[in-house]
C-alpha cells in the first residue's frame, strides 16, 4: 500500500507518519509512505528523525500547489492523507493570502491530481473551527459551516471543494474535523507549547482577553488514530468529527501549565483579545464512535504531563524555532 501524506513534516502529519511506519494503523503491516511537504516555518524534518532511515519512507520537498510535482507524487498512490495547511489563526488575521493559496488552491490541485491518478481514497483533515462558535451543546457533522477567521474560512472552502469532487466526479473522499490538538513536536506558536517554552525560559505567557474562551483538547495520538480509522473504514463522502472530551477555558489551561512549571499568576501577561475570537468550540463525536469505534484513549492529565516533560527535554528541537523569526510572543 502506498500512502501520500501531505504536510508530513508538520506537527500532526509527522506523528501520523511515525506511527504508520511502525505498523500501528495497519495491523502490523507497514505501508510505503511518501511525505510531501513544503517545509515552511511549520514543517520540520527533525520531526521525522525517528523514522528518517526507514527504507519505506520517501520525502518529497515541494508545494501542494505545484501541479506537475503533485501529479508525479500521486502516481500509483492508494491513499492520500491531506494534513498540509496554513493553520495559525493569528497569522491569517495578519495576512490571509497564503491561507487561500495553500488551503484552497493547494487542495484543489491535490484533488485534480488524485482524480486523474485514480487514488483509492482521499482523507481531508479539517478543523472544528469551520463551524464557528457555539455557546452550548456540541456540533454534529450536519451543522452548517459558519467560519469566523480567514484561517477557518479557507479550511471551510477546502472542505466544500472536497465534497464537490466527490459529488461531481465520484472521488472517494472523507473529511475529518478535529478539536484543538496538543502533544510533542507542536510548533511553539501554538498555545500549549508557547506557554510551556516561555515558562521554561522564565518568560511571561500571554493570555488573551478574560481567558474565558473554551476549547476541547485532543491528544495528537488520538487524532491520528481516528484519521487512520477513517482512512480504513470511513464511508466515502462522509464527514467525521474527532474530539478529545476535555473542555477547558484558556484560563483553566493556563492555571494547569503554571502549576506544572512551578510558577504563579505573576507570570501571566493579560493581552488584548484576538480579533473575532470564537468563544467556544465543541464537537459531537457520536458518529465516529458509533460507526468506526473511536474513543479517545489519552487522558488529558497524562497527555499534558508527558507533553510538558517532552518540551523540557527537547530544547534542541524547539529553541531553533523560537529564534528564527517565529512570531510567538
Image (tube, grey):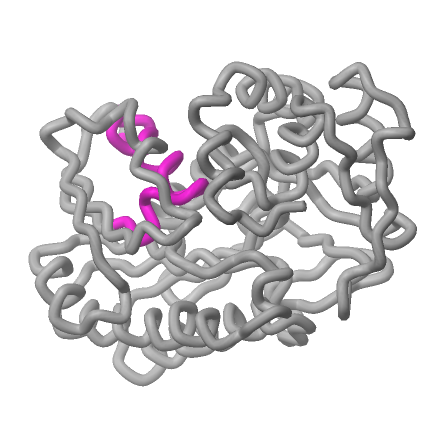
Counting from the top left corner in percent of width and height, residue 17 is at 31, 36
Residue 255 sits in quarter: top right
Q: Is residue 293 visible?
A: no
Q: Residue at x 67, y 53 (%)?
A: 283
Counting from the top left corner in percent of width and height, residue 208 is at 81, 51
Q: Residue at x 88, y 49 (%)?
A: 212
| Residue 9 colored in magenta in the image | yes
Is 174 situated left or right of 22 in this image? Answer: right
Q: Residue furthest bottom?
A: 168
Q: Residue at x 51, y 68 (%)?
A: 155
Residue 69 sits in quarter: bottom left
Quadrant where the image shows the N terminus:
top left
Position of residue 113 relative to residue 83, above or below, is: below
Is 164 situated left or right of 262 in this image? Answer: left
Q: Which residues are magenta?
A: 5-26
Quadrant where the image shows the C terminus:
top right
Q: Is residue 61 visible?
A: yes
Counting from the top left corner in percent of width and height, residue 75 is at 8, 60
Q: Residue at x 73, y 56 (%)?
A: 281
Q: Nearer the viewer, residue 246 or 95?
A: 95
| Residue 245 colored in magenta in the image | no
Amino acid at each position: 500500500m502506498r500512502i501520500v501524506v501531505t504536510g508530513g513534516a508538520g506537527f500532526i502529519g509527522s506523528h501520523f507518519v511515525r506511527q504508520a511506519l511502525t505498523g500501528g494503523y495497519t495491523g502490523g503491516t507497514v505501508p510505503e509512505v511518501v511525505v510531501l511537504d513544503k517545509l515552511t516555518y511549520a514543517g520540520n524534518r527533525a520531526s521525522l528523525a525517528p523514522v528518517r532511515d526507514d527504507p519505506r519512507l520517501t520525502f518529497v520537498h515541494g508545494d501542494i500547489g505545484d501541479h506537475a510535482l503533485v501529479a508525479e507524487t500521486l502516481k500509483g498512490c492508494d491513499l492520500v492523507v491531506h494534513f498540509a495547511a496554513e493553520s495559525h489563526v493569528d497569522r491569517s488575521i495578519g495576512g490571509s493570502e497564503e491561507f487561500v493559496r495553500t488551503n484552497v488552491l493547494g487542495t484543489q490541485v491535490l484533488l485534480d491530481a488524485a482524480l486523474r491518478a485514480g487514488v483509492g481514497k482521499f482523507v481531508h483533515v479539517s478543523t472544528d473551527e469551520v463551524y464557528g462558535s457555539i455557546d452550548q451543546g456540541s456540533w454534529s457533522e450536519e451543522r452548517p459551516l459558519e467560519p469566523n477567521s480567514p484561517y477557518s474560512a479557507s479550511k471551510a472552502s477546502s472542505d466544500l471543494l472536497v465534497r464537490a469532487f466527490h459529488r461531481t466526479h465520484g472521488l472517494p473522499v472523507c473529511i475529518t474535523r478535529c478539536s484543538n490538538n496538543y502533544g510533542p513536536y507542536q510548533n511553539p506558536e501554538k498555545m500549549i507549547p508557547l506557554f510551556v517554552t516561555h515558562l521554561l525560559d522564565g518568560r511571561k505567557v500571554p493570555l488573551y482577553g478574560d481567558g474565558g474562551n473554551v476549547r476541547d483538547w485532543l491528544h495528537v495520538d488520538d487524532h491520528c488514530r481516528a484519521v487512520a480509522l477513517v482512512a480504513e473504514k470511513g464511508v466515502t463522502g462522509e464527514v467525521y468529527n474527532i474530539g478529545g472530551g476535555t473542555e477547558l477555558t484558556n484560563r483553566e489551561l493556563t492555571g494547569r501549565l503554571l502549576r506544572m512549571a512551578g510558577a504563579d499568576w505573576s507570570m501571566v501577561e493579560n493581552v488584548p483579545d484576538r480579533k473575532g475570537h470564537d468563544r467556544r468550540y465543541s464537537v459531537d463525536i457520536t458518529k465516529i464512535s458509533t460507526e468506526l469505534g473511536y474513543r479517545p484513549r489519552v487522558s488529558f492529565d497524562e497527555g499534558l504531563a508527558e507533553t510538558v516533560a517532552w518540551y523540557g527535554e527537547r530544547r534542541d528541537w524547539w529553541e531553533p524555532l523560537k529564534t528564527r523569526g517565529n512570531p510567538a510572543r
